[in-house]
Structures are given as C-alpha cells and as structure tokens.
Amino acid sequence: MAGVGKRVSAESAAMSKPLPTRNNPALHGRWTVDESAQVYGLNDWGKGYFGVNAAGNLQVQPTRDPARAIDLRELVDGLRERDIGTPVLVRFPDLTRQRLQDLYDAFATAIEDNEYAGRYRCVYPIKVNQQRFVCEEIRDLGGRFGFGLEAGSKPELLAVLGMTVGHNELPIVCNGFKDREYIAAVVLATKLGRNIIPVVERFRDLELIVEEAERLGVRPQIGLRIKPAARGAGKWSASAGIRSKFGLSASYVLRALAFLQERGMADCLEMLHFHIGSQLSDIRRLKSAITELAYFYAELSRRGAGLNTIDIGGGLGVDYDGSQTSCESSMNYTVAEYASDVVYRIKSACDDAGVPHPTIFSESGRAIVAYSTALIFDVLGTAEIEAIADVASIRAALEARPEDDQPQPIHDLLLAHDSLTDRTMVEAFHDAVQARDEAMSLFTLGYIDLEMRAAAETLFWCVCRNVLERGRKRRELPEELEDLIEAMADIYYCNFSVFQSMPDSWAIKQLFPIMPIHRLGEQPTRLGTLADITCDSDGKVASFVDRRDDKHVLELHELREDESYYLGAFLIGAYQEILGDLHNLFGDTHVVHVGLENGGWVIREVLRGDTVKEVLGYVGYNTDELVRALRQDVERAVSTKTLAVGEGRSLLGSYLSGMAGYTYLQ
Ligand code: PLP
C-alpha cells in the first residue's frame, strides 16, 4: 500500500528521503514533547483524544480537553501497585461516550443544515466488540440518543435480546444467515415488545419471516438488504457489488415486494439496507452507493412498500495513520462530512421522487469503539546488529594467512570500508553487497572458513553503519539505500502477542499507532522494529504509522537499567479482542476500565487475564492430571536419586505457581 493516496507526491517520493532522528545531530539540543508528538504523528491519528503532558507522558483526553486526562504512565504505575502488570488492555468508556456524541452531533448538524425531516439513529454492530461491558455501555450511553444494537448471528441475537430487557425502545437490526429458529426468535421478540427488524439477506429469509409471522400472529417489521452495484474501496470492497455474498439483486427486490403485496404485507417492508464494506477510505464510493440506495428506496416507496428507514450499514472509517487520505489505513473525510453527504444524498433522491424523508440508520462499529481501547506492554530487551568491528585485527588476520588463503571478497570489503566517502557511499555500498554475497557463496562451497565468513559479515555491517551515519549527518539518504534503515534497526522484544492483541496487524497488515507512553520529553535515539513473545517469526510489527507513508522502523528510546520501558498500541478497540487467538497459549490480557472522575481518573473495572491453567483448559488439558503426572515423575526421580528432594519441591512449586499465573512474562 506504499504511498497509495497519501499526500506525498510521486515526484517527492522519488527524491531522497530525510532520515529519521536517530543520532541526528541537527535535532540534538533540548528535545520537546511537541517534537515527540510530531515524530509519532500523535496529533494526526490522535484527533485530540491523546496528548503529551509536561511530564513527558502520553495522556488520554476522552473529551478532547487536555485538563481532563488520564496519564498512561501514572496509570501503569497505579496498576502495578494493585498487582496488575503489563500487558494490559485499557478501555476508556468516556471516549466511547464521546465518539457516540460526536456521531450524534454530526448527524444532528447535517439534518439541521439540510432541513431534513427524518432522524438519525446508529445501531452498533456488536460483532465489532461483543464484550458485555462495551455493549452495555453503548446500550446505556447510546440509548440516550435513540441508538440501538445490531446482531449478525444467532448467538449475537440472543445476547442482544437479553441485554435489552427493559429497553424496548432501542432499535435492533438483525443481519447475517438466518434459520427458522433465528427468525422465530426475532418474531417472538416482536411479540415481547422489542423494536426489532430482521433483514432479508436471501429470498428464503423472507419466506421464513412470513411463515413464522403468520404462525405466531405477528406483523413484523422487515428490512431488505440490497446488492448495490457501487462498491466500497480497499480490503472490504467485496462486501458489495453484484457478486457480493449478501443481499438481493434488483429483480429479487421486486419479487420480494410482490411476495409481500400478495399477502397484504407490503406495509411490513419498512427498511432498506446495504453494507458496502468496512473502513471506507474514499468518500466518493459512499456517495454513489448512497444515491443508489436512496433511489431504490424512493422507487419501492412509490410502488407501495411501507418504507420508513434507510440503513446505510457500517463502513465509517478510522484514520489509523492520521494521513487523512484514501489509503487503506485512513479515510479522506471527516465524520461531519460523512453525515452531511449521507443526509444530503438521501434527501435529494427522496425530494426528487416526492417521498417523505426516512429515518437514517447506520451500523457504525469501528468508528465508535476503535479509539477507546489501548494495549500497554513492556519491552523485555533489545537486539542490535553487531556493526562495530576491529577492522585492524581483521586486516591483520587476513594478511597473516598465506596469499592463496586470503579470500578476495574480504579484500574487497576492506577496500569498500576504507574508500567510503560522502561522494562514494552508494558505490561502496554496492561493492560491499557484492563482496558479502560472494563470501557467502564461497563459504557454502567450502572455499572459505568460518573465521573469514564472520569477517565478511562484520565488515559488511560496518560499511552499512558508516553509510547510514553519513546519511544522517547530511540529513538525507539516497532512496536505494533506504532499506538499510530497516535492515540495521534494533529489535525490541515486547511482552505481548500480536496474534492475541492485534491480530489484524498480522492477518491483513492493518496499521495501528504504536508509541512509547513515557520519556516523551527525551529524544528517541534508536530505531527499532517490534517482536512479540510468540515463537512465530510473524509475531512482529514492522510497519508504523506515518503521515507521508508507512514507515518500517519506529523511533524508540535506549533501554535503561532497572527501569521498565512501556509502549502503547492504540485504536485497537474494534474487532481485535474477538479475533485474537491463543497462539502459543498466550491468553486474554488483563483488562481495566478507566474513567474520568473528580478531576482525576478512577479504575472502574478490573478483569484479570487468563491464567495458564485456564488456557490449558481451553485446549482440553486437565491441569490436575498434569500436576499429578509431574508429581509422580518427580517422586520417581527422587527415588532413583537423579533429583534431590529440595529440587523436586522447587520444580513442583514453580509448576504450580506457573499454572496459577498470567500467561505473559511477569
Ligand atoms: N454492518 C454489517 C452488515 C457489517 O458486515 C459490518 C462489518 O463489516 C458492519 C456493520 C460494521 O462495519 P464498521 O465496523 O466498518 O462500521
């Protein structure tokens, strides 16, 4: 996705790129927190919900007011005092509330500006984050704006039905595959007084709804999902279009209306729905799809359907990389623009056709919950490339050999090293690459020994380091040498699992903002990539948000003795929790809910992460059996004197406490 739709022009991208800050003398001096904010693009992706305070700590500002903030470093220390370590998932309910308010306000303004006669309601699709606390918050906070919930499966429907007891006014939209049981539950919920709309995704759904409604004596509210020709853009564009998985084509839509008319139920067809894909990055796609949907609506209304609602599905994006462009991790519009376009397009089509303005539903999920969850994790250590060598000793060792045992590639590497200047650095780099490759081939063929191979590797990295240092001093690096930055980056080993906490980063290369949560008053002097603690080489993060283009290294601080270094991954509240898996048996992390209260913050909820015993249980182990088996083995070893009694006790003790402990490193 490099550069797609980003502000950097093709011309400027082709030019050499200014180097990141590592050891950049031009940027030494007093480093400010504003410079840190700039390095990490905080004001771009943070949208005012995140800021850096004078102590150099990252803070969450749920209401965008820097004076009402949660200092993340302070929070992590507070959690440690309560024996809750990292990694920890932190949810900020006040930020969810703010997102709901922002969405409501954007549509209220658009409705007023366009003199629109209908109202707007969001139905939160619980699949985006089904956690009970999240859904209940949205039910309670969103309920004040008339917002509701969307279920996309039978289990989700059952959760929603239980969750909305006493909330009959909330709209409930039911999507997804439906069998008779699912539909019977919806029809009975109507009898119970719920404001519930099953959406017909296949013609068979309609037949079942009508059969169950007749059997149970209910007049249901029915929604139809159409297949718009217009598609979204990006990863989820296949959610719409003529060949999409869900929805009715135009001819089936007409058949559906006729089917209902024949049974005197045309008035039950109350809602038209579509979903053109999640994370809509380009507003133009939405505009044409909305117009298409609105014309379906107008025409079906004129043909006698009892329509009163248009559901525009999900798709409202999140600007993960802060670039405000149409690239996949961003969006080239604001929430206000989204609302304005939706309202204006629907109004125009309805006015043209002379039909009343419908209520507008959106199934916005990502846009509501993404911001309100962050993962905080600690760095366990780093690995750096060995790029400092005693060149004189290598030279001496080479020259001490008989002439016919002095490999030519090592001479070439020494020459590249010695002849390197600002002017010749590209040439010297090319020579070094060639000599290094030749040395590796000669080693594989058995012509050079391990000592000379090691010399080749070391000299090669020395040349690379020298090239990078020169680039840094000049503040630019020729484009063809840019990959060197990544190749020479440090690896920061981090106490989390990508597969559990940010699965989309691995599965679909989704970018999430990641940055230190403290030491932001200090210049980050290292460049690194992140590796998680799974034993999988895919368990890493090597793409980071950047306004110009995604970058492959992150600016980080040097680790200090006896001081933890914490990083945060942000905007992970949508989809990540439920998609996360148990790779390497790393389970759910601790979760805490933190709210604003009395001019400070307060921990409202603590959910302990999985213990080793729990995750072993998920995959079918009986841990009592495991302990019994180990105990017997220890006794056997003690009786044969291969283990002392004390050693056996110590092994069993750590086995038992490991079982009861967190799955992450403590
Ligand atoms: N509605 C439907 C039918 C969906 O399939 C989805 C997700 O793909 C959504 C709503 C939520 O979309 P988003 O999270 O992009 O708002």
Image (cartoon, helix red, strand yellow):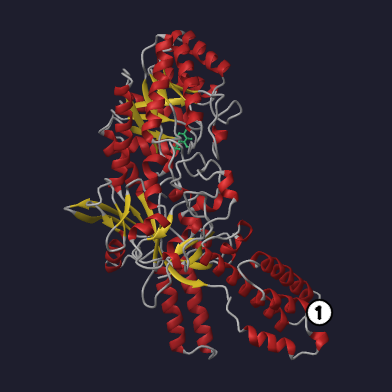
Q: Quadrant of the C terminus?
A: bottom left
Quadrant of the rendered image containing residue 53:
bottom left
The residue that appears at 31% across and 61% down in the rendered structure is: 57
- The answer to whether residue 419 is visible is yes
Q: Please identify the residue farthest to the right as the structure is shown.
A: 404
Describe residue 591's horizontal placement relative to residue 492 as left or right: left
Which residue sits furthest front?
423
Q: Residue 266, how many percent across, how many down?
A: 44, 12
Q: Which type of secondary structure does the marked residue at label 1 adopt?
A: loop
> Residue 395: x, y in percent?
69, 85
Query: Image quarter for residue 613?
Result: bottom left
Residue 605's x, y, as percent?
Answer: 28, 54
Q: Is 625 in front, or is 213?
A: 213
Q: Amino acid at mark 1?
A: Tyr
Residue 381 horizontal side relative to residue 388, left or right: left
Category of crowding for the residue at label 1, using alpha-carbon neighbours closer than 10 angstroms: few (below 14), some (14–19), many (at least 20)? few
> Looking at the picture, does residue 215 appear above or below residue 35?
above
Q: Is residue 187 visible?
A: no
Q: Residue at x 39, y 12 (%)?
A: 351
Q: Nearer the viewer, residue 271 or 367?
A: 367
In-front residue for pair 284/181 = 284
Label count reads 1
Q: Which residue is mark 1?
A: 447
The residue closer to the viewer here, 636 or 57, is 57
Q: Position of residue 387 (x, y in %)?
A: 58, 75
Q: Determine whether 285 is above or below 373 in the image.
A: above
Residue furthest left as drawn: 598
The verdict on label 1 being within 8 Å of ligand 1 is no
Depicted 212 relative to depicted 611: above or below: above
